[in-house]
Image (tube, grey):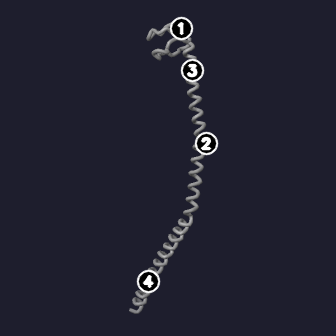
Amino acid sequence: MALIKCPECGREISDKAEVCVHCGIKISGMEHLHEKARLKEKEILKKKNKKMVSLIPTIVTVAAIAVIGWFIWYQATASDREDKEFQDALDKFNNTTDELEELERQLEYNERLIDEYDEE
């Protein structure tokens, strides 16, 4: 015995039942309705699958355009990135030079203090 859904109330009933025990609708002779419903469901699923399959080329095309667009932008801005990296390196060099000059001044000052201390 298998369970089927009543075409009227949707509750599960025996496939051997002649009437639905829940709503009383006559079931015998309605097997063709079940088969018809299954075929309709399969047809709907096929249509959905076809739509999904037809979306795949569109998605791939959009993704390819996005990647190509990003690559073009990346190449177009490469010069700007190189300029910024160069400027950053130059700024670090200038900061280092300033720090070295300050250390040299401190060293000279310390040497003078040592010389004055030694003279006393």
Disc 1 marks which residue?
A: 28
Labelled pair 1, 4 in contact (Cβ < 8 Å): no
- Determine the residue positioned at 54% across, 65% down: 81
> Element under label 3?
helix
Measured in 3D between alpha carbons, the distance from the residue under mark 1 to the one under mark 2, in whole angstroms, is 48 Å
Q: Residue furthest bottom?
A: 119
Side of 22 where 47 appears, left or right? right
Characterize the local packing of mark 4: few (<14), some (14-19) or many (20 or more) Cα atoms within 10 angstroms.
Answer: few
Of the two numbered discs 1 and 4 in the rendering, the one whose residue sits closer to the viewer: 1
Measured in 3D between alpha carbons, the distance from the residue under mark 2 to the one under mark 3, in whole angstroms, is 30 Å
In x, y percent, where is residue 65?
Answer: 58, 51
Characterize the local packing of mark 3: few (<14), some (14-19) or many (20 or more) Cα atoms within 10 angstroms.
Answer: few
- Determine the residue positioned at 44% across, 83% down: 105
Which tag, 1 or 3, sits closer to the chain's start?
A: 1
Task: Work out which quarter of the rendered image holds the C terminus and state it.
Answer: bottom left
Q: Nearer the viewer, residue 8 or 85?
A: 8
Disc 3 marks which residue?
A: 38
Which tag, 2 or 4, sits closer to the chain's start?
A: 2
Characterize the local packing of mark 2: few (<14), some (14-19) or many (20 or more) Cα atoms within 10 angstroms.
Answer: few
Which tag, 2 or 3, sits closer to the chain's start?
A: 3
- Determine the residue positioned at 57% across, 55% down: 69
> Which of the 4 quarters of the picture holds residue 40?
top right
Q: How many marks?
A: 4
In x, y percent, where is residue 16?
Answer: 54, 8
> Element under label 2?
helix
Q: Which mark is residue 57?
A: 2
